[in-house]
Amino acid sequence: MPVALTVRALAGSLPSVSTSMLVVPVFESDTAADHQEIDAATGGELLRALEAREFRAKPYEAFGVSPAGWATRRVLLAGAGARADWTTERIRRVATAGALAARARGAADVAFVLVSGGAQIGVAEAQAAAEGLVLAAHDGDALKTTPREAAALHRATVVVPDASLTWSAAVERGRVLGEASNLARELANEPGNQLPPRILADRAAAAVAGTGLTLEVIDEHGLERLGMGLLLGVGRGSAEPPRLIVIRHTPRAAGESRAATGPVLGLIGKGITFDTGGISIKPSEGMERMKTDMSGGAAVIAAMRAIAQLDAPMPVVGLVPAAENMPGGRAIRPGDVLKAASGKTVEVNNTDAEGRLVLADAFWHAQQLGATHLVDVATLTGACVVALGKLASGLFATPTWWGEIVRETATRAGDRVWPLPLHDDYLELLKSDIADIVNTGGRAAGAITAAMFLREFAGGRPWAHLDIAGTAWADEAKPWQPKGTTGVAVRTLAELAFTSARWPAAAA
Ligand code: BES
Ligand code: MN
Ligand code: ZN
């Protein structure tokens, strides 16, 4: 477990804020006059640095100064770019970059000054700042036994414009969502040998403890009883048996009637704890990355924790079909036909297209549990990485309004998504000669045919699919995001559970 992080909102004048590093955003167009207090207390240092172009306030640039007589001696001027670009996304990233830079300089206690770019700032901005600070607390090297150089973040503060109470609630919400993102990053980072399906279920138990969520873990015998031939089939090549992890949130003050008749959000995350490809085995180059093939499942577990902590006003079920895709002696072979829990028969022409198989059975169970609206998150296809690179997740949805809600929510949450089409004609590519459907449709439109396969199992309910194959792992470090697992989609899933008032009622 990471060191406990305290996060708070604090109103006060800058010289009086006491912390080990005070992060102050500076815009490109700012002059020393915009930061008179700092400039005066540093003997004109800011003016000098700006004039010498030593500090240009480009996004994520950092410049340290030492104001005389302030409660905090170390101030980090954080490049914030153009005032017009001071969005929640930019705020989140500048807060992370500032806190990471502070940690690298040995500061364990960081305060970030929530400034305005010109427009009115409010709770969304305060929440984003808190999220950003908490995201900077994540470390991807938990298994190293040598001490790390950067300080561990113990306390993060958002310095807010006034003493209103609403800031505190917003900062607390940001803390919960930031911590959830970090939990998903930690889970996804765990090596395959340490996180088989059984242990992922234990991690889910730890994540729900004390939150009011209920957890059910269905083992291989239970899966047999439920007829989950797809999930069992994928798990068969491994010595580690599959699991279906089921987490439920019931709103604390559930108006009984609404809980019984209103919409139920179903979140489903791909939980392949390691993907060798199975008998259709992957090349060894880069295969180690396939320990992150449960990133979607990690996102669902972490989002469920946040949903309970924030007491989302609607019931939510979270499902993680977990299996290890291995080429053992009992593994499924290309050409095998499996029977889904829904009754459909699937010809497996490629055992490396395992994600859609395990998700399909989980979709069925989500519907059995009453889910009316489905969202799945999965590191599903290399084809999606080819289409969108590593900068956006693929979004597939039906009907269109449901996709729009997911897209708007993702944008707000700081998860970049981009829509890809689901024309019925693509279904042609999934025709089987001997079964109801095949599991892969060839190289062309690989991300789309994978989504089309999933759609066949969504029971006609509003359904959205996020393909996070490219976004779950960052190949290179950025100032606002270290190399490694990203926690993508966690905040989107959690925030979605707060949007039901805007869903068209009849569609449920
Ligand atoms: N887990 C992979 C997809 C993946 C690729 C995730 C790269 C992250 C980075 C998935 O199970 C898979 O193997 N998909 C195949 C599908 C193909 C056989 C139709 C792929 O993308 O090659
Ligand atoms: Mn695969
Ligand atoms: Zn996979």
Image (tube, rainbow, N blue to C red):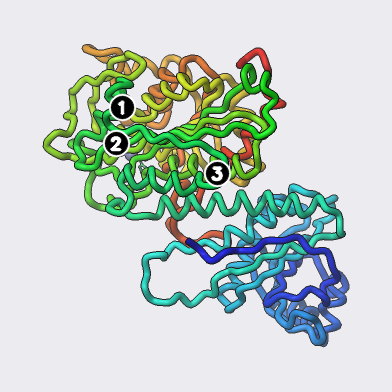
Instruction: Give the numbered dot on residue 223.
Output: 1
Is label 2 in contact with label 3 (beta carbons under 8 Å)?
A: no
Can you say whether 67 is above or below 444 in the image? below
The x and y percentages for residue 495 are 63, 39
Label 3: few (<14), some (14–19) or many (≥20) C-alpha neighbours in 10 Å: many
- Amino acid marked by disc 2: Pro
Q: Residue at x 76, y 54 (%)?
A: 168
Which quarter holds ligand 2? top left
- Quarter of image, res 361: top left
Circle 1 sits in a helix, a strand or a loop, which is it?
Answer: helix
What residue did someone put label 2 on?
242
Is label 1 in contact with label 2 (beta carbons under 8 Å)?
A: yes
Q: Residue at x 83, y 80 (%)?
A: 39
Q: Could you say which is closer to the camera, residue 209 or residue 332?
A: 209
- Amino acid marked by disc 1: Leu
Q: Residue at x 58, y 73 (%)?
A: 103
Residue 205 visible to the viewer: yes
What residue did someone put label 3 on?
305
Q: Residue at x 44, y 40 (%)?
A: 296
